[in-house]
Structures are given as structure tokens and as C-alpha cells.
């Protein structure tokens, strides 16, 4: 099965000015920014921010109580499974317990990861459920206001491992639609990067339809997603905010910090997560997003350098 990484490459975006003043207009050219003559000395500042990566992985969770997972007999996910397999309402099949045990069996082991600060995303190997990264971020400012920003977004939707088999067998996950763009104010630029991924197509099909040994759930798999916002100011302040789907676990790495920041998965929301995929089986790359779980915000400092240009 082919692996489809998310949007990547170097992005260069210019701020569009709508006011016509003596300082002149800004136009994009192949070499960077071309400025009209101002007959003055201009202060130019370049601020380079740290690389940021968010990685998703399924942590271990307790399966002793399906009620605690939001999968009790009256939950939406269980009722859908009953209807799909023509069971009477209130009859609780063992099928859901089997699927939850399989999900637990496919949990990830981050102890196998290498060092992200020296290896980058290669440190995760295939033992992850997707990562998204913003790197090579440089904001260019003129007299304290943003002019343009250069950055490189990249992502990988991850892998679906075969549960409880050693050595593990991995299938490439499905990538969903992604978006990457920048916005500007008079004081900062914001980079916006949203990525999506869900379990591999064959496993998704099996979970929906079932087979001779497993009851189908009649539910499509939702997309887990990362929505990253990277704000960088002309003063060198960096704010990174990650809005994340409710499942699974998340780690955030920032190159300028040796800390790993965590957003824990909430097993009590597993039933809502499963039902959010909807009752229609969708083609690859199409479907519903999982519910969100809040934000993870961290701060950093960019490295800035000044130069004076005579026009």
C-alpha cells in the first residue's frame, strides 16, 4: 500500500499591502522581496523560529469497563453496531469488546523512538499514528512590520500496526485533506497548518464490514487531525498552539527546548470518537473529522538579526 505524506516543501508568502504610501509597494520576485525605491535607509530584520513537530500515538488504556470508555449498551457506537448486524436493541454482542481489544493490541510503544532533536521525524520509525511539522520558519520585517515569511510544512499520516503480532506488520495510514497558509498583522505572521490521517484502508474496511470471524461495526473511521498555529513576531516572540482531535495521545517537540509537551488521550471519549466517523463508508481521503479535545500552547524565542539597507 502506498504511503501518502501530507503537504510539504518550502512556502514563501508575502504580505499584501492595500495602502498606497510614499514607502512604495511590495512585489514578489524569484529572488525574494523587491521593494520600490524609498530614498531612505531601511531597517530590515530576519527572525528565524524553532522547528516544531506534533506526533500522535495510541497509549495504553484500560479495557475492563466499556462503560468507562463511552461504549456502554446505550452508546451511539454500540447501538449502530447492533443495528448493522441486525441485533435487537439492548442485546450487547461481544463484537465491540473484540474491536476494543484489537485497538488496545495495536497501541504504540514510544520507548522504541530515537532522539527527535538529533534525528528528526525519522526517530519515530513506523511506531506512530501521524506527525505534522513546521520548520525553516523565517519572518522578514521592515521597520517593525512583517513583509514576508518563509516556512516548510511537512506531515506523515502514520501507520496502522497489526495487533499483538511480533515482529509488527505495518500498513500505511490514509491521509486526508491538508491545508497550509499564512496570515499577517502589522506586528506578526501566523502560519496555519492542518493535517488529517486515519487507519489504513484495508483495516478501515474490515472494521466497517467485518468478516467471518469479526462483526462489522457499520462505522467508518474518523480522521484524527492536528491544527497547528505558529505565530512569530518581529520582536522574536513565538507562540505555538496545537488544536488536536480527542484521540489519540499527542507529544509536541520544539527544537529550542529539551522538554516534551503532552496532550493526553481521553479514553472516556472513545465511544464518541468511534461514532464520529459516521455510518457511511467513504472512499479513501473522504470522511468525518474526530471531535476536538482542546489546545496545547507553548512559547519560544526566535533568533533575530538586523541589517540596514540604503535604497
Image (spheres, helix red, strand yellow):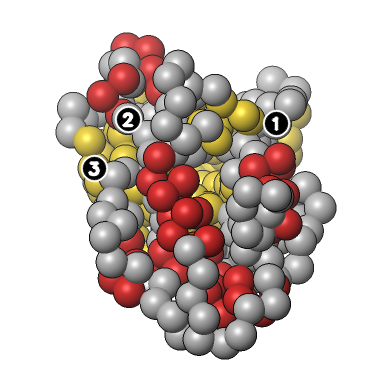
Q: Cα distance, mark 2 to mark 1?
A: 23 Å
Q: In the rendered structure, find residue 251 and report the number of the disc placed on it.
A: none
Mark 2 nearby-residue class (10 Å; few <14, some 14–19, many ≥20): some
Q: Are marks 2 and 1 in contact (CB under 8 Å)?
A: no
Q: Position of residue 86 (x, y in %)?
A: 70, 77
The residue at 71%/42% (across/down) is 201
Kindly give the residue lying farthest to the right in the view shown: 283
Question: Going by the image, does 276 lie left or right of 64?
Answer: right
For disc 3, the marked residue is 261
The residue at 37%/34% (across/down) is 108
Q: Secondary structure at mark 3?
A: strand
For disc 1, the marked residue is 4
For disc 2, the marked residue is 109
Residue nearest the observer in this picture, 28 or 67: 67
Image mark count: 3
Q: Does residue 304 lie above or below 267 as drawn?
A: above
Q: Secondary structure at mark 1?
A: loop
The residue at 52%/32% (across/down) is 162
Residue nearest the observer in this picture, 285 or 189: 285
Q: Position of residue 163 (x, y in %)?
A: 47, 35
Closer to viewer: mark 3 or mark 1: 1
Residue nearest the observer in this picture, 195 or 236: 195
Q: Secondary structure at mark 2?
A: loop
Kindly give the residue lying farthest to the left in the view shown: 259
Q: Cα distance, mark 3 to mark 1?
A: 27 Å
Q: Does residue 29 lie above or below 205 as drawn?
A: above
* Rendered-image quadrant of the N terminus: top right
First of labels 2, 1 by sequence position: 1
Quadrant assignment, res 60: top left
Amino acid at each position: 500500500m502506498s504511503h501518502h505524506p501530507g503537504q510539504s516543501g518550502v512556502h514563501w508568502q508575502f504580505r499584501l499591502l492595500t495602502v498606497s504610501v510614499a514607502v512604495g509597494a511590495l512585489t514578489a520576485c524569484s529572488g525574494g522581496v523587491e521593494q520600490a525605491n524609498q530614498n531612505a535607509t531601511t531597517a530590515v530584520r530576519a527572525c528565524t523560529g524553532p522547528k516544531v513537530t506534533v506526533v500522535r500515538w495510541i497509549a495504553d488504556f484500560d479495557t475492563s469497563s466499556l462503560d468507562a470508555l463511552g461504549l456502554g449498551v446505550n452508546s451511539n457506537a454500540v447501538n449502530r453496531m447492533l443495528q448493522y448486524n441486525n441485533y435487537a436493541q439492548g442485546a450487547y454482542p461481544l463484537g465491540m469488546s473484540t474491536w476494543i481489544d484489537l485497538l488496545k493490541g495495536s497501541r504504540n510503544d514510544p520507548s522504541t523512538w530515537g532522539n527527535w532533536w538529533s534525528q528528526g521525524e525519522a526517530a519515530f520509525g513506523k511506531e506512530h499514528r501521524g506527525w505534522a511539522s513546521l520548520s525553516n520558519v523565517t519572518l522578514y520585517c521592515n521597520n517593525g512590520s512583517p513583509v514576508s515569511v518563509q516556512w516548510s510544512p511537512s506531515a506523515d499520516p502514520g501507520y496502522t500496526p497489526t495487533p499483538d503480532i511480533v515482529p509488527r506488520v505495518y500498513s500505511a495510514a490514509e491521509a486526508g485533506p491538508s491545508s497550509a497558509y499564512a496570515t499577517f498583522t502589522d506586528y506578526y505572521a501566523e502560519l496555519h497548518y492542518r493535517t488529517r490521517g486515519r487507519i489504513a484502508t484495508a483495516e478501515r474496511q474490515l472494521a466497517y464490514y467485518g468478516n467471518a470471524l469479526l462483526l462489522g461495526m457499520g462505522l467508518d473511521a474518523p480522521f484524527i487531525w492536528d491544527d497547528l498555529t505558529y505565530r512569530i513576531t518581529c520582536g522574536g516572540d513565538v507562540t505555538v498552539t496545537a488544536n488536536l482531535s480527542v484521540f489519540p495521545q499527542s507529544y509536541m517537540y520544539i527544537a529550542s527546548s529539551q522538554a516534551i509537551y503532552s496532550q493526553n488521550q481521553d479514553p472516556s471519549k472513545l465511544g464518541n470518537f468511534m461514532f464520529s466517523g459516521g455510518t457511511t463508508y467513504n472512499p479513501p481521503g473522504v470522511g468525518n473529522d474526530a471531535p476536538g479535545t482542546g489546545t496545547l500552547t507553548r512559547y519560544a524565542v526566535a533568533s533575530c538579526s538586523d541589517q540596514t539597507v540604503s535604497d
